[in-house]
Image: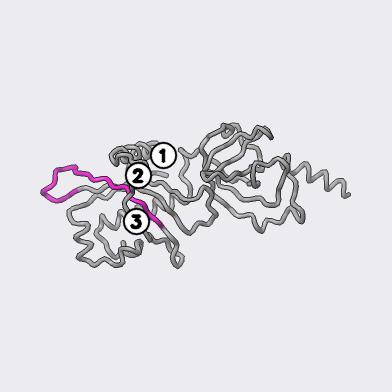
């Protein structure tokens, strides 16, 4: 009977893996994670692993499909850590992949949440609704009606174009903080301005969950670290928006 159980385990487990000492069913530390990184070919084991943007390595518990067997391919991976599996030639901790997609064709759950909240912020400006803005933005709570009117005076048609999250290459889910950059524009609507006078702005933002609700806790101008001209930064983000969303107006995105 014991020999039968041992044989069955070898059949069911991925090649090169063994259950950790204790119980193979023990997954108390099997956290769900979102990994942004690249596929890496591991010559020592003739297989493919995942390296996140911070250099941390992971070993898929199941072989990647042919579509993703390309060294250097940028991917987003929704996975569960499998500390109950180990092997002598593992690339890193074992992961059970729930979903994998090419990075340039996939908008992850945390990005969708940031887009939703940034669109709500754009809507508050378009509606000149300071009360709604204060519900979303901790910093805006200090604004008076007069200050808000002066800040938004002469502008309308606030439009969100692009969102890109940064932070650690591996994020444990559920997430409670989001950081990134966004590109939006606003248009001068007073009679003194030329028609179509659009101003683009790139901002850094931080979102945190406070009392169970998402709030903007910081928003600041974005400054390219490599000194790239801001007009070129805007052009690059608009090109990425077309590629990623199929539109440069995220309010019209069908994703």
Residue tagged 2? 224
Hey, which residue is sitting farthest front in the picture? 226
Quadrant of the rendered structure where residue 143 is?
bottom left
Give the mark, 1 or 3, whose residue is nearer the N terminus: 3
In this view, the residue farthest toward the left is 192
Q: Percent position (x, y) of residue 127?
A: 25, 57
Q: Quadrant of residue 12?
A: top right
Seen in the picture, residue 208 relative to 224 is either above or below; the reply is below
Q: Residue at x 75, y 46 (%)?
A: 18
User: Which contiguous range is marked in magenta?
Assistant: 188-206
Q: Which mark is residue 219?
A: 3
Q: Give the vertical position of 212 relative to 253 (above or below).
A: below
Which residue lies at the image location 75% right of the left edge and 49% below the top edge?
19
Residue 81 at what x, y percent from top left?
Answer: 63, 50
> Tag 3, which secondary structure?
strand
Residue of label 1: 244
């Amino acid at each position: 009977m014991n020999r039968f159980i041992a044989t069955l385990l070898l059949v069911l487990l991925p090649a090169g893996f063994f259950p950790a000492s204790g119980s193979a069913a023990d997954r108390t530390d099997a956290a769900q994670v979102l990994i942004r990184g690249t596929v890496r070919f591991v010559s020592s084991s003739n297989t493919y692993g995942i390296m996140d943007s911070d250099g941390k390595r992971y070993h898929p518990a199941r072989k990647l499909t042919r579509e993703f067997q390309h060294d250097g391919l940028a991917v987003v991976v929704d996975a569960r850590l499998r500390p109950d599996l180990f092997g002598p030639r593992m690339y890193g901790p074992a992961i059970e992949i729930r979903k994998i997609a090419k990075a340039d064709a996939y908008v992850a759950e945390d990005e969708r949440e940031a887009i939703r909240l940034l669109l709500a912020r754009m809507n508050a400006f378009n509606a000149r609704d300071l009360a709604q803005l204060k519900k979303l933005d901790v910093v805006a709570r200090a604004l008076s009606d007069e200050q808000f009117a002066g800040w938004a005076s002469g502008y309308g048609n606030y439009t969100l174009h692009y969102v890109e999250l940064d932070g650690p290459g591996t994020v444990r889910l559920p997430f409670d903080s989001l950081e990134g950059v966004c590109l939006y524009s606003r248009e001068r609507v007073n009679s003194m301005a030329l028609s179509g006078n659009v101003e683009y702005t790139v901002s850094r933002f931080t979102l945190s969950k406070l009392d169970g609700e998402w709030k903007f806790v910081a928003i600041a101008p974005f400054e390219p670290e490599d000194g790239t001209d801001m007009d070129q930064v805007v052009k690059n983000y608009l090109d990425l928006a077309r590629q990623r969303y199929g539109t440069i107006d995220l309010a019209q995105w069908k994703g």
